[in-house]
Amino acid sequence: MKHQVKETVAICEERVNEERMRLTTAEERHQAVMTRVRDYMVEQEKDVVHWRRNFSQLAALANGAIDDVPRMLREADTVTFRDPPREVQIFLDHCKWLVEHMKILVARARD
């Protein structure tokens, strides 16, 4: 009987040790995953800062275009050309179309 108890205790100790090893391995994997997640979050935060700065610059450029281009186009329209080259007239017409299209897009974005 004593032998059987020792055997049972040895089996239980072995199972406890195996479970402890599994737990240790799982904890190590968990820590590795958490480290990768933290590293990824740091990279994502850097990307957010980068894209936010680029977007701000693009927004500033667009705002400048929205302010300056229509005024400059109106000024160009006041200049009287005698028979302007076809390419110049196409360019001016295209700029007018772009300004109108931008106004529509800005109005939609504000709504």
Image (tube, rainbow, N blue to C red):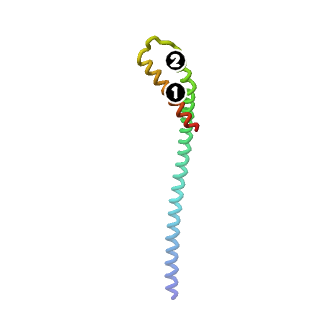
Residue 74: mark in rendering: none
* Snapshot quadrant of residue 86: top left
Comes first in the chain, label 2 or label 1: 2
Q: How many other residues sit within 10 Å of disc 2, few (<14), some (14-19) or many (≥20)?
A: few
Q: Say which amino acid is labelled 1.
A: Val
Residue that mark 1 sits on: 99
> Where residue 65 appears, x then y in whole percent?
54, 27
> Where residue 88 appears, x then y in whole percent?
44, 18
Vertical placement of 94 versus 81: above or below? below
Tell me what residue is drawn at x 56 percent, y 38 percent: 52
Vertical placement of 98 versus 47: above or below? above
Vertical placement of 16 versus 59: above or below? below
Tell me what residue is drawn at x 49 percent, y 78 percent: 11
Vertical placement of 79 versus 93: above or below? above
* Snapshot quadrant of residue 34: bottom right
Q: Pick the residue in front: 35 or 82.
A: 82
For the C terminus, the image quarter is: top right
Q: Pick the residue in front: 100 or 26.
A: 100
- Outermost residue on the bottom side: it is 1
Residue that mark 2 sits on: 77
Tell me what residue is drawn at x 49 percent, y 24 percent: 96
Q: Pick the residue in front: 41 or 60.
A: 60
Q: Secondary structure at mark 2?
A: helix
> Where residue 13 appears, x then y in whole percent?
52, 75
> Where residue 28 appears, x then y in whole percent?
52, 60
Tell me what residue is drawn at x 51 percent, y 17 percent: 77
